[in-house]
Structure formats: C-alpha cells, structure tokens
Image (cartoon, rainbow, N blue to C red):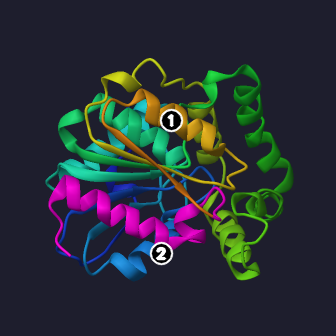
Amino acid sequence: MTAHDLAGLQVTESGGTGPTVLCLHGIGSSSAAFAPQFATLGDRLHLLAWDAPGYGASTDPEAPLDLDGYADTAAALIREHGGPVHVLGVSWGGVIALRLAARHPALVASLIVASSSAGSGTDPAKAAGMRARAAELADLGPRAFAARRGPRLVSDAAPEALVRRVTDTMARAVRLPGYGYAAEAMAATDLRGELPGITAPALVLSGDLDRVTGPGASQLLAGALPRSAYVIVKDAGHLANQERPEAFDAWLLSHLRITAGLGD
C-alpha cells in the first residue's frame, strides 16, 4: 500500500543532539507512550515519536494501510530526517520496526523491539481476535474500549496513576478507521520467515509480567534475529518502557553505546 502523506503525520521531537531514535507506539497508543523517555533522555537523544496514521493527532489514511504501508511511512519519515536512525518499537510498533528493517535495511541503524511478536498471523485464533477488535471499538467507543483493555497493559502492581495514564492515552489515541486498519495489518502478518534476514543489531526486551504478548513471543524474535540480545525487565507488564522506565532506559542507553558509540 502507498505510504501515508507525511504532511498529515503528527511527530513529537526532542532537542537532544545524540543518536536519532524513531519511536513507534503500540496498537492502542500514541506518541504519548514515550513520555518517560522524552522526560529523561530527550536532552541526550534526538527522539522522534509519531502518532501512527489514523491515530491521535495524525490524519486518517485515505485508504487502508497494510504493514508495508506503515513501514514505508516510517521510511519516508526517516529519509526526511536524514536517516539512518535507531528504531524503537513497542508491541505493534515493534512489528512495524521489524518489517521496516527487512524492507529498508539501509535506513535502520539498529532495532530496539519491546514486548512485541512476529505478528498475529502466526496463529489463526490470534488473528481472529485481532480482527474482532475493530467491531469492539465501534460498539464500545474509545473511552469504554480503553477502560476494558488498558489495565492489562501493565502489571497488577502498577500504580493507579499509571493505569489511568495508559487508559487515557488509549482513549485519546484510538479511533476508526485507523485502529481497524492497524488490527487488520497485524492479523495478516507473520514475520517468522523474514526475521533471519534482518541484519540490523537488535535489542529485544520483554517485561517478565507481560500478559499480552508474553516473554515467549520476544524470545522467538530474539532467537530468530541473527544479531540480537534478549533482556527481561523485571516487575514490568506489557508496557515496560512506562512501568519500569529506569531499567528500560538503562538497557536502551547500553544498546546505543554499542551500536552508536554513545558516550556516558
């Protein structure tokens, strides 16, 4: 599918002069998912975080986007900023990041893939569940939809303030048709065959309490990627970058010291 017009893409940018990191959020979120990283790393790193096409403040796609369409939009954004860049993808954002690295390898200096998977197309039941989400959003509306799904994205021990923030972010970010396009793209995707061909060095992370994709899905990615390191973030659910930002950021910086020569 054709890439989304960058003129309609909302991108939040930090002023750091270090390596550029493109941040791709999960299927129920927006650029706000990376607020902890912007707060603590924005002065050291050049962070870019999009609201994906059809999410948040970005415009709706004129036609359905498949995974290639999202990856090609990210590629266009990287080119606009002079690429290559390091790409941080959380959950659905990690799936986009992996396709981006397979499809546009020259634009991806490295990958940081958090709480992600090879796509919902790896299992018929997962694919069917993903496709059902658009109807659920239509029936419930964004606020009730977020109230049902948001709390599962963090661990049971997460502070109530974080649960509220995650839920509010989802309620503000998701709408149709964009969410439906994203869900269909996930349902149609099985990256297992292309993972071994991805050459970018990758850091794969998972919260040990992730009950959405789970550590097993991240282990599958790390085992298939030729140049990968795998890390468990303790006491974190699906959104480890928000629930345990100190630990997550420490691993991100360590990865960039190796792949980008980032100084202390």
Marking on residue 246: 2
Q: Position of residue 132 (x, y in %)?
A: 78, 35
* For residue 20, side relative to residue 132 (left or right): left
Which residue is rendered at x = 65% and y = 65% of the image? 235
Q: Callout 1 environment at 10 Å: few (<14), some (14 to 19), or many (20+)?
A: few
Res 215 quadrant in image: top right
In the image, is 120 to the left or to the right of 200?
Answer: right
Amino acid type, residue under disc 1 in the picture: Ala
Which residue is most to the top? 193
Q: Residue at x 39, y 42 (%)?
A: 97
What is the three-letter code of the residue carrying label 2?
Answer: Glu
**Residue 43 x, y percent position in the rendering:** 27, 81
- The local secondary structure at tag 2 comes to helix
Where are the magenta residues, as a range?
235-264
Q: Callout 1: helix, strand or loop?
A: loop
Viewer can see residue 82: yes
List the residue tagged with mark 1. Answer: 63
Residue 122 percent across, percent down from the top left: 62, 23
Between discs 1 and 2, the one toward the N terminus: 1
Q: Is residue 81 visible?
A: no
Separation of disc 1 and disc 2 at Cα?
39 Å
| Marking on residue 262 | none
Q: Nearer the viewer, mark 1 or mark 2?
A: 2
Q: Quadrant of the N terminus?
A: top left
- In the shown orientation, is residue 167 left or right of residue 91? right
Residue at 62 percent across and 24 percent down: it is: 121
Q: Which of 227/8 is in front? A: 227
Which quadrant holds residue 129?
top right
